Image (tube, grey):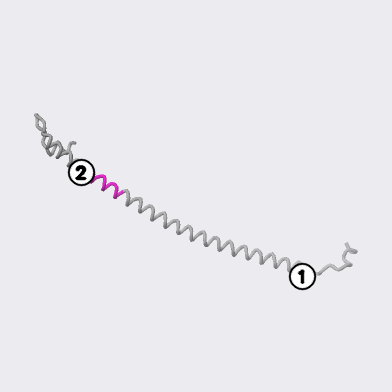
């Protein structure tokens, strides 16, 4: 409203309806311009955050994939070690039927 009063130069007698409406339209246009600018800035900030979060999600997905591969590799190694241990045990001297007499 202050903008309208500054533009119209309020008189002691008041201002005409036409001048008031014209000033009111100017103020509303100015408010709309500010709202649009604010909206664009907010959209830009949100878009920037979305891009950052997507990038972080992609990085984490890559990291998770790598961890899954590492886990699979470790499981394979572990199963191979167990097989080797079982082979070593089985390759040890086999007990014969006489073995139970020497306990």
Seen in the image, is 3 located left or right of residue 99?
left
Q: How far apart are marks 1 and 2 (CA)?
A: 91 Å
Q: 76 and 18: which one is in front?
A: 18
Could you tell me residue 9's position as x and y percent?
10, 36
Q: Position of residue 47 (x, y in %)?
A: 35, 53
User: What secondary structure is found at the residue carrying circle 1?
Assistant: helix
Q: What stretch is highlighted in magenta?
A: 29-41
Q: Residue at x 74, y 68 (%)?
A: 88
Does 81 sit left or right of 43 as displayed? right
Compare residues 47 and 73 and report the one nearer the observer: 47
Q: Name the residue under label 2.
A: 30
The x and y percentages for residue 71 are: 58, 61
- Residue found at the very far right of the displayed protein: 101
Q: Residue at (42%, 56%) from the top-left corner?
A: 54
Of residues 91 and 3, which is closer to you in this image? 3
Give the number of the disc on residue 91: 1
Disc 2 element: helix
């Amino acid at each position: 409203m202050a903008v309208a009063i500054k533009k119209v130069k309020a008189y002691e007698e008041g201002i005409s309806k036409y001048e008031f409406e014209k000033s009111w339209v100017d103020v509303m246009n100015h408010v709309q311009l500010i709202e649009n600018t604010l909206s664009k800035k907010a959209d830009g900030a949100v878009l920037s955050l979305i891009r950052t979060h997507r990038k972080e999600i992609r990085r984490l997905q890559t990291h998770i994939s790598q961890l899954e591969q590492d886990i699979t590799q470790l499981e394979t190694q572990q199963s191979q070690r167990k097989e080797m241990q079982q082979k070593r045990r089985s390759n040890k001297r086999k007990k014969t039927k006489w073995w139970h007499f020497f306990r």
